[in-house]
Amino acid sequence: MRQTVRRLFIAFALALIYLFVLPVGTGTELLMVRNTAVAIAATAEADSTNEQLVPIVLGSRFAYLDSTGRPIAGGRIAYGIAADSLGYVNYPQRPDSLVLQSADGGFLASLPGNAYPALRNDAVLTVGSNQQTLTRYTSEGVSLWSYDAGAPITTLAAGRDLVVAGTLAGVIVGIGAAGQEVLRAAPTGSEVSAVYGVAATRDDERLAALCGLRPRQLFIFERVEGEYVPVFRADVDGDARRAVFIEFVGPELLITETPDGALVVDNQSGRVAGVPMGAPILSAGWAPSLDVLVGMSEPAEPQAPAGSSRLVIATPEGRIMVSVPWAGRHRDLQVRDTLLYAGFDQTVVQIGLGEG
Amino acid sequence: MQRYHRLPVLIMAVVSLTLIGWRWPVPTPQPTATFGQPDRGGLHTGIRLAGGAQPAYPVDEGEVVFVFRGDAASPRRGAAPATLGTALVAEHARGFRSVYAHLDPASVPIGSTAVFPDVPLGLAGDSGLTMNRGLLFTIIDARGSALVNPLLLLPGLDDPVPPSIDEIRLVSDGRSRQIRTGVEVEPGTYELHTLVADRFWWNQSPPIMPYAVAAYLNGETVAEQQMDRFAGTAGGDRPVFDHDGLLVLGRVTIGAGRNDLEVVVRDFAGTERVVRVELRGVARR
């Protein structure tokens, strides 16, 4: 009897030790997932007052860079990250709430969970668990509007007040400041309907969409007397069955992904030029003082090592000026005039562009 | 006594078994939530299948239309955040699209353009915004822009357990009252709420939404709700649930004297459960 009691006591003591000294998960406990967004304290030399910080994603981490390329703040990504100049939301896989934080980690707003966030040109958006419901908030977390897209949302873009969503049903929707539809277009002419990419200019004057399979079609809409009217349509190469890259950059340029690199549309002149990169473009920016496009693509060479990429600099007319293989899996690209920030896994490379 | 129409169900069953000939998307289908069932303030528009990390197969051959990527740390710029996780959308004959959501990201090959019935799409997982491991399977009728109950198009499952009607309530002015035969009710118009459920054969089968629920008052149809298809946007044809998860069937007007209320629920196997309640409409003095 005494021996039994002693054994029980030893077993109880070991259990207590296990719980408090060696908390090894068994996979059945309810775990608290820490939403980490560690604010890295600025150094004494760094002066981030009134300067535009550059958000950049680096695989499992993210950072905000100052004008010298130094990380001012950042942290480990819990599950997903939505970041732009307004701030960021670093969210776990199953968020009870979404916390919008400033670049230095300060609290800005709390948004309802059961959704994933997206930040586009300082527009604070969430996509609901059904992949159909889109909600816009102010930077203080006040709901502005909620919209049911009627089909899963594949791609998102935003201007100042305008939010553009593309859906699986092949519908392009433009939503205005009050949550009203300012555009609803369901292009026909392709064998398969779906929207694969959308883009909007910062001033809400233009929006673009890549739609359909066989053929893939590029549409540009322009705001005329308060309404968005189609001003451009073209069949383009490509049949990627995922979200593809499309953005307005520079003064009047639209860049879209193609199987061979990128397509550049000059909205002023209507000129269309291909940029042959050898592989689809992943991200792009514009260096205004040099009048060049900067882009990162997948590696062009079949024998290129896995996890590598390629840096390309080209003119708007499609002439390649620089094409450099890069030994790193591309994650993000930000261009600030003549400074290029290329994000790779946990590494950011700052490149100065200049004429020589 | 009237019954809701069985003919559309029969037609859909014949179509599913002969002309469409789909198969279940997993080898061991264990539904844990079905079409039209409440889900975190919204509605299930597909069917959730438990069973762990089993391979997910396309219900038929078809073409890949879109792949959502649930590896959120490396999203493509412009891609909408994927609450469906890694999800593949395929298009089949007759304009039907099937969606396989919350797949294991590492198991889904990149660049697929076609799907074949015997080639797995990937493994059922828990990517994206989901509380459970398993496949979320949805059917879209692309031509009609409607969501279709997958149980109408997939082979029937063994379903020996009849559906149940657990509660019937009359709601008025924010007050809810459970009713049984012989209850006295003040004449007037009420909202009719009911708690219904169905269960499948397998152990720990959670309650799921039956196929159809109807209510009749004194032989007249007062409400019918069928979980067969919903329009793409919320509204009109979708079931509504109260805060306690009871289905809001509609409004009934109780007159003075005897009122015969009948609630009928049917599951996908065609089994019905009927509850008859005799109410006495008595005005308060």
Image (cartoon, helix red, strand yellow):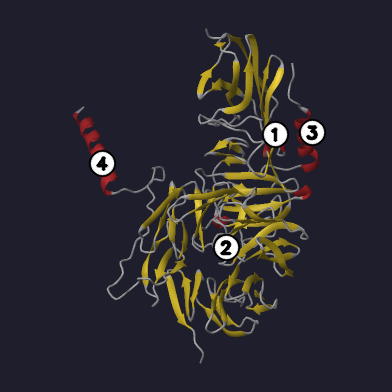
- Which residue lies at the image location 64% right of the left edge and 70% below the top edge? A256
Q: Are marks 1 and 3 in contact (CB under 8 Å)?
A: no
- Which residue lies at the image location 64% right of the left edge and 84% below the top edge? A319
State which quadrant residue B280 falls in: top right
Q: Position of residue B146 (x, y in %)?
A: 70, 43
- Which residue lies at the image location 34% right of the left edge and 49% below the top edge? A24
Residue type at tag 4:
Leu
Q: Position of residue A312 (x, y in %)?
A: 57, 80
- Which residue lies at the image location 61% right of the left edge and 65% below the top edge? A199
Q: Position of residue B114 (x, y in %)?
A: 71, 57
Q: Dot 3 corresponds to which residue?
A: B11
* Of callouts 2 and 1, the N-terminal one: 2
Drawn side of residue A153 relative to residue A333, left or right: right
Q: Dot 1 corresponds to which residue?
A: B156
Real-space Cα distance between discs 2 and 4? 50 Å
List the single residue furthest toward the right.
Answer: B19
Residue A16 numbered tag:
4
Element under label 4? helix
Real-space Cα distance between discs 1 and 4? 51 Å
Q: Are marks 2 and 4 in contact (CB under 8 Å)?
A: no
* Of callouts 1 and 3, the N-terminal one: 3
Element under label 3? helix
Category of crowding for the residue at label 4, using alpha-carbon neighbours closer than 10 angstroms: few (below 14), some (14–19), many (at least 20): few
Q: Depth check: give the residue in front, B236 or B126.
A: B236
Residue type at tag 3:
Ile
Of tags 1 and 4, which is closer to the observer?
1
Q: Dot 2 corresponds to which residue?
A: B78
Q: Chain of mark 2?
A: B
One can see residue B198 in this view? no
